[in-house]
Image (tube, grey):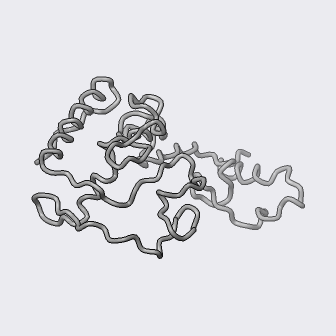
Amino acid sequence: ISLSLSHQAQISNYAGVRHSTLRYYTADKNVTCRNCSRRGHLSKNCPTPKKVPPCCLCAERGHLQNSCPARFCQNCCLPGHCFRECLERPYWNKQCNRCEMQGHYADACPEIWRQYHLTTKPGPIKVASPRSRRSAMVYCYNCSQKGHFGYECSEKRMHGSVFPTCPFVFYYDDEHEIRRRATRLKRKVSELQEAGLLPEQPPAPW
């Protein structure tokens, strides 16, 4: 007499198992398969073909993270290629001439977007007043000690592969500098696309 596939899977689930190992899955307990979501067997004995795992970046099936069209480079933070294909030098050899911090170049400096912290309307960037004297209640997020900020800490970093950035804005761009940076970024995009490391972007709908 032929048995159905689900019955075969259920029987093989318990075949040859000692009584001492039936602590969680016994014949009189209902178990649910993680592959087909049906009761009566485990995923390792499921007769249904195994599901293809989704990509952790885009949640689509059919590919994994390494071959995902939406993957991005952890060195330059641009999409279309990975670290080993990047044309830029490794981030630990980068020095920003804007904030003087290590780990990035000036055109990728966090200060670029931080400088808009007071700007709420179109037009020139609103400049903040000079910073007052440092508060004595400052605590470091890296070593938890009092008296300095995390980016100034000389202790070993909690995450060795992450470089700290300054939380303050020391320089505000004018319109001329914003246009110059936009031109440099367009040139960089063209170079990456010519090298096949950045996918062509569809035209904006507006």
The residue at the far bottom in this view is 137
The residue at the point 36 percent across, 71 percent down is: 133
The residue at the far front in this view is 133
Decide which of 98, 194 is in the foreground and name it.
98
Dividing the picture into quadrants, the one containing residue 203 is top left
Dividing the picture into quadrants, the one containing residue 202 is top left
Drawn side of residue 145 relative to residue 11, left or right: left
- Where is residue 22? Give x, y as percent: 83, 61
Decide which of 73, 69 is in the foreground and name it.
73
Dividing the picture into quadrants, the one containing residue 180 is top left
- Where is residue 116? Give x, y as percent: 23, 60
The residue at the point 71 percent across, 48 percent down is: 8
Drawn side of residue 35 relative to residue 74, left or right: right
- Where is residue 95? Give x, y as percent: 40, 40
Vertical position of residue 55 compared to residue 184: above or below: below
Decide which of 59, 22 is in the foreground and name it.
59
The residue at the point 38 percent across, 47 percent down is: 100
- Give the total of numbered labels: 0
Decide which of 59, 197 is in the foreground and name it.
197
- Where is residue 114? Give x, y as percent: 29, 58
Drawn side of residue 7 relative to residue 170, left or right: right
Drawn side of residue 193 relative to residue 82, left or right: left
